[in-house]
Every structure is written in structure tokens, then in C-alpha cells.
Amino acid sequence: MTQGTWLITGVNSGFGRHLTEQLLARGDRVAGTVRKIEAMHDLKMQYGERLWLAELDLTDAPAIRRVVDRAFEALGRIDVVVSNAGYGLIGAAEEVTDEQIVHQINTNLLGSIQLVRAILPHLRAQGGGRIMQLSSMGGQATFPGGSLYHATKWGIEGFIDSVAQEVAVFNIGCTLVEPGGARTDFRYRSSRLGPKIEAYSASPASIGRRIIEEGTSLSIGDPARMAAIMIDSAAQNPAPKRIALGSDAYTIMHKQLGERLAALEAQKDLAFSTDFPKQA
């Protein structure tokens, strides 16, 4: 797909910024949402009307619908929507605060759900389109110290899987993107820590905290290459259901999915034993 129109949330940094830069450079139009528009001054000066911007806080559900409506009104047609904005909350389940839990779920899960709900009437009216949801290898695999982040990513994966089946009849394709670690601001600038409980120093949950606090570990993934693959996937028909990005994502998800499948297969006889007899 070339010279299309994209709507992307969280375009000021990370994957959102890489996607926006690459799309604008090849001639596409981008409707981008940010928390502060001044963060996009350089690209706006360079690309002018091809970059449409709006401020948006994904925890504000009514604002999501207003911004989506404005974007379609301003640009006429939007071919691909990338639900990208989000952040990580690191800490054991007991460590994170109630307020942090609510904000994490409202941003990563409910914000993404409401974005898709706001988009669908427009995509149906125009005869189709593509929804690309940024998940994570953490949407298929888990690590101690990331329980609330995993809750949002596993939740959005179930939501998108179901929505994809609901809207395929309208020529709307859905793709879940599952990156591993990438050298973006996600780990050291966007991620947040729950208050420390000293007892968890003896728990594997402390590993993620130490990585954030030390700030020296480099992710293996190249975000520019990952963004290019996401862009290329928009031209695939049918839409790929999932895209794993990064050797760490492939390796970790493959291991944990294999373990889950083996555990399920071991329970086959037990599962079947709970059915009513066939003659009943």
C-alpha cells in the first residue's frame, strides 16, 4: 500500500514515531494523536497538511470518539488504524497501587477497546480498512513483575481476535503485532514502577524492577525495522492475524506456547471425562 492514510495513536515516540516518519517519507498521510502536540513540531513543519494532529488521552473515552470523528471528517478516508499508545507497569501484583492498576487498564486495554469501537462505524461506512493493534510478546508469554501489563495485553489480544471474526464480513482486517524488546523509550522512559515492598526482593518479580532502575540493558530489537514490517503488512490480503517481531519474541512465545499446549494435551482424557455420556 502506498500513499494511503493512516491513523496512529502515540506518534511522539517509539513505534508511533517510527511509523509516522516512514509513512510520511514515502508520501502517505498520517493522522496522529499525542498527549502534547508541540512534541511533533519538527515533523509538522516538514510535512504540513500531510500530518494531521490531535491531542488525546486514551483514558478519556468520549475524547477518543471525538478525535476519531474529527480525523475522518478532516481526511475523508483512513485506510489503516494503528492502536499504538500504551506503557508498561512494572512490579509485583501486591506492589502496584490501586490507582496505578486503574490507569494501566484504562490506557492499555479500555483505551484500545474504545478506539476500535470508535473506528468501526467509519470503516464499515467506507467499505473496509485495516486495524493494527500493538500488543507485545507479553500478550502471549508472561514474566514475573509484569502481571498488570500482561493483564492488559492478554485482554486486548482476546478482544481483537474476537473483533476480527465479527468484522471480516465488512472487509475489515485485524492484525495483532507482538514485538519483543525494542530500542525505544518504552523501557526506560515510558514504563512505571510500583512502590517497592522489600519482601519481593527475594522474588523473581524483582528482576524487572532492577532492569528499569539500572537502566543499562539494551533491547535486541530494531524499532525502525519492526515499523517497516508493520507498514508492509498493511498490503497483505488477508490481514495476518499476528506478527511476531524479534528473535526474543519468537523464542519466548514459542517456548511458553509449547508448554501450554503440552499441558493441555496431557489433560485430554480428563477434559473429555466431564461430558455427559453420548447416550444421555
Image (spheres, helix red, strand yellow):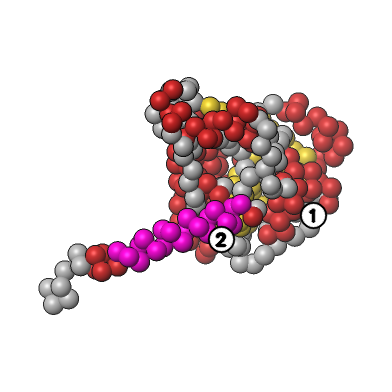
Residue 117 at x, y = what percent? 51, 45
Quadrant of the frame with the N terminus: bottom right
Residue 257 among those drawn in magenta: yes
Badge 1 crowding class, 10 Å Cα cut-off, few under 14, some 14 to 19, many 20 or more, is: few
Residue lying furthest front: 202
Give the magenta-colored segment's residue range: 248-267
User: Would you say 142 lies left or right of 70 here?
Assistant: left
Q: Position of residue 247 (x, y in %)?
A: 64, 55
169 left or right, relative to 45: left
Q: Earlier in the sequence, mark 2 or mark 1?
A: 1
Identify the residue shown where x is 26% and y is 64%: 271
Query: Which-is-in-front pick, marks 2 and 1?
Result: 2
Q: Main secondary structure of the magenta part?
A: helix
Please tell me which residue is depicted at 85% across the width and 40% down the height of the picture: 47
Q: Amino acid at mark 1?
A: Gln
Locate residue 3, reporting x and y percent.
79, 54
Q: Confirm whether residue 5 shows in the render.
A: no
User: Residue 159: x percent and y percent?
Assistant: 46, 50
Labelled disc at residue 241: 2
Query: Is 264 colored magenta in this rendering?
Result: yes
Numbered label attached to residue 205: none
Q: Nearest the camera: 51 or 270?
A: 270
Q: Amino acid at mark 2?
A: Lys
Q: Which residue is the site of mark 1?
A: 3
Packing grade of label 2 (10 A; few <14, some 14-19, many >=20) is some
Residue in the image at 60% along x and 44% along y: 83
- 57 above or below 243? above
Check disc 2 and report its element: helix, strand or loop: loop
Q: Calculate the distance from the C-alpha at mark 2 to the C-alpha at mark 1.
A: 23 Å
